[in-house]
């Protein structure tokens, strides 16, 4: 996806290089390099191929500081990879595997929704005292445009953003799904006169519970949406927390609008994805409960 | 194409069966009788170094014995010995420098001992007390020391191998007087994908790293016949374009020479080297294993009585009037007393404070969910103080 174009010329081949085709090697190598106090960015070609590195990420990277009694750490490692639906990706070029990683204490998991967020969040990940996994929405590489400031700036990790304030229903998502949700909120406003409060989590581990809880206490309704499959998807975590913290404030059950519990299909992508229509219907269900 | 394989053509058909390739010889200086082999050069390491090496081997063996027994008595939960591999441990450690970062597997406590970790350090970790640098979070023998450049042990096998390659990349530019990185692993761990990953990365990225394989013939109950069919681990190096040597792991002087030379080579060329140290695991895999269930007692006894690195070096020293029975008795008595004393002190120390140490260091700072969970646990501890205690 050409993210490193020109970097080798500018910074040299000792700092920007190819490795053998081996995800467990890429992450393992990155762990050892950053455990020596250095900073590194490990790129995986598609999030669908992260799994050979799963042991290194969950058993090693996430536990490096804790198991050493804080003698060692891999703060300097950021793993970035393209994720998500692209229209023709099928099983192995479309996945959103964040739920495997949000279940792993010791790493941070981050999703930018546009170029301005991408720069600020990536810089925060690189400079974070904790190892980070950065999921880049491949569908937005060409399509999402923004006025990105040229100066250095960071967007804090662990902080959600209220992209659009509202009063009737809280709508939560992250990454590429934010555009889908914005469209659904527009539809709800135009067709139902409903005011949606749209929240971008930005960091899913650790996630900003307070922003979502405060919103739901105001609206009494919640819709959470992601492309990843529904069962054990991240929306489950949000729903469970909200019903715990906002039980008496809820006017309707929490709605999860997610991919189906199937592998990501090719020709059925349009049917599979949690699109703006499904989210609109979920918002309607909340209002009519 | 860049760095293409420079192959030529042939009209002769040959599968080049692996059995037709010669078996790599093991470099050895002192034979199992403790005498210099024909053709071997006298190492001339000097009495001070030789004395230190022998004392460390014995101290390691005695520590292993006492702590193993401590587990049997229920005083610690788990232990692993280096029995039979003291030559590998101390010989390698002596040939490396303390500034060479080590990524070990779990049977390399001798490296820490050589570098200056005290018996108290070992005992504190095994007893998971408040002075355990790992804060009581991991099982015994999962040592780590930033001061001694020994990265904390983790249970998953071979994960340290590609990590070590990355760490070596970090010291690549230190020049001819720079450090190297060394990683240790058993012949069983070398079957893991991470071994392949580490070897390939180290050669392609030209890292100054020593891959040190302890071939002790058993991976818990899996003998080498079920672990691989090639010529051990050393034969794999050529496939990666890597230099390699096989060494008699029961001859501490050969281990020292082999690792010393490997270190020089790796540093001078910024290239990896694979060293396969041939030995035998005399003890059980761990305190959770009874190896008599899968191997004959005679086999264990044979290795213990004829190939053990400690008596072999003792003979070498005694032949040069550098050792005697009186020194042996004194050393073993002092070594045993020292371990018992460290153990008693470790046992009497309190455990790490639970509320703080359970939650700290997951991240640099506590995240909100951890703060909340810590409060929940604090409340449970208030309600049921007798249950939630580290005192037994």
Image (spheres, coloured by chain):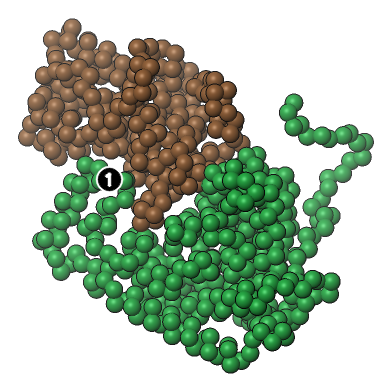
Image quadrant occupied by the C terminus of chain B? bottom left
> In the rendered picture, chain A carries what hue?
brown
Percent position (x, y) of residue B80?
Answer: 49, 70
Residue B356 or A234: which is nearer the viewer? B356
- Residue in the image at 62% along x and 68% along y: B91
- Residue in the image at 21% along x and 58% along y: B355
Vertical comparison of A190 with B365: above or below: above
Q: Chain of mark 1?
A: B
**Residue extending furthest bottom?**
B326
Whether residue A6 can be seen here: yes
Q: Is residue B221 left or right of residue A123?
A: right
- Residue in the image at 56% along x and 25% along y: A8
Q: Classify residue A11 by image quadrant.
A: top right
**Residue extending furthest top?**
A190
Whether residue A283 can be seen here: no
- Residue in the image at 27% along x and 18% along y: A181
Residue that label 1 marks: B365
Vertical comparison of A98 with B30: above or below: above
Vertical comparison of B258 with A148: above or below: below
> In the rendered picture, chain B carries what hue?
green
Percent position (x, y) of residue A63?
Answer: 39, 50
Percent position (x, y) of residue B39?
Answer: 84, 71
Image quadrant occupied by the N terminus of chain B? top right
Q: Is residue B87 left or right of residue B115?
A: right
**Residue extending furthest left?**
A248
């Amino acid at each position: 996806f050409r993210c490193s174009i020109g970097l080798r010329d500018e910074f040299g081949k000792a700092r920007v290089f190819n490795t053998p085709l081996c995800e467990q090697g890429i992450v393992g190598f990155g762990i050892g390099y950053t455990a020596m106090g250095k900073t590194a960015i490990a790129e995986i070609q598609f999030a669908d191929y992260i799994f050979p590195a799963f042991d290194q990420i969950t058993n090693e990277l996430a536990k490096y500081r804790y198991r050493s009694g804080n003698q060692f750490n891999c703060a300097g490692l950021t793993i970035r990879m393209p994720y998500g639906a692209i229209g023709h990706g099928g099983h192995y070029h479309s996945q959103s595997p964040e739920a495997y990683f949000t279940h792993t204490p010791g790493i941070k998991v981050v999703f930018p929704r546009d170029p301005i967020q991408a720069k600020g969040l990536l810089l925060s990940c690189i400079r974070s005292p904790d190892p980070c996994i950065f999921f880049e929405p491949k569908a937005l590489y060409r399509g999402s445009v923004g006025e990105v400031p040229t100066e250095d700036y960071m967007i804090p990790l662990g902080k959600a953003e209220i992209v659009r304030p509202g009063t009737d229903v809280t709508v939560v998502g992250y990454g590429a799904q934010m555009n889908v949700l914005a469209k659904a909120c527009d539809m709800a406003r135009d067709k139902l006169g409903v005011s949606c409060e749209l929240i971008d989590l930005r960091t899913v581990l650790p996630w900003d519970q307070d922003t979502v809880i405060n919103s739901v206490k105001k609206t009494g309704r919640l819709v959470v949406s992601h492309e990843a499959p529904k069962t054990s998807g991240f929306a489950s975590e949000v729903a469970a927390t909200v019903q715990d913290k906002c039980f008496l404030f809820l006017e309707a059950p929490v709605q999860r609008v997610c991919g189906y519990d199937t592998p990501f299909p090719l020709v059925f992508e349009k049917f599979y994805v949690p699109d703006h229509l499904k989210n609109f219907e979920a918002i309607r269900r909340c209002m009519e409960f | 194409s860049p760095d293409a394989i420079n192959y030529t053509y042939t009209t002769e058909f040959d599968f080049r069966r692996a059995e037709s390739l010669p078996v790599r010889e093991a470099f050895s200086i002192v034979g199992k009788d403790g005498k210099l082999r024909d053709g071997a050069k006298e190492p001339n390491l000097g009495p001070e170094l030789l004395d230190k090496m022998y004392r460390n081997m014995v101290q390691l063996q005695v520590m292993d014995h006492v702590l193993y027994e401590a587990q049997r008595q229920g005083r610690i939960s788990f232990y692993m010995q280096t029995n039979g591999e003291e030559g590998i441990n101390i010989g390698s450690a002596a040939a490396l420098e303390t500034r060479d970062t080590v990524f070990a597997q779990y049977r390399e406590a001798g490296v820490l001992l050589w570098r200056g970790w005290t018996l108290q350090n070992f005992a504190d970790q095994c007893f998971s007390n408040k002075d355990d640098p790992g804060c009581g979070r991991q099982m015994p023998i999962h040592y780590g020391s930033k001061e001694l450049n020994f990265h904390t042990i983790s249970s998953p096998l071979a994960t340290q191998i590609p990590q070590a390659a990355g760490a070596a990349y970090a010291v690549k530019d230190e020049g001819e007087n720079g450090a190297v990185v060394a990683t240790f692993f058993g012949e069983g761990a070398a079957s893991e994908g991470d071994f392949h990953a580490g070897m390939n990365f180290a050669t392609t990225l030209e890292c100054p790293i020593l891959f040190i394989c302890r071939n002790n013939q058993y991976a818990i109950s899996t003998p080498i016949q079920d672990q691989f069919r090639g010529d051990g681990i050393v034969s794999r190096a050529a496939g990666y374009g890597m230099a390699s040597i096989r060494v008699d792991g029961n001859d501490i002087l050969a281990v020292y020479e082999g690792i010393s030379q490997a270190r020089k080579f790796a540093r001078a060329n910024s290239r990896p080297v694979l060293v396969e140290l041939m030995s035998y695991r005399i003890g059980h895999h761990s305190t959770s294993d009874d190896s008599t269930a899968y191997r004959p007692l005679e086999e264990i006894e044979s290795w213990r009585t004829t190939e053990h690195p400690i008596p072999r070096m003792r003979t070498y020293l005694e032949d040069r009037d550098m050792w005697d029975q009186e020194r042996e008795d004194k050393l073993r008595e002092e070594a045993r007393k020292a371990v018992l004393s460290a153990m008693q002190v470790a046992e009497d120390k309190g455990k790490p404070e639970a509320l703080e140490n359970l939650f700290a260091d997951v991240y640099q700072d506590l995240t909100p969910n951890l703060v909340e969970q810590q409060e929940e646990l604090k409340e449970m501890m208030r309600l049921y103080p007798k249950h939630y205690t580290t005192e037994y």
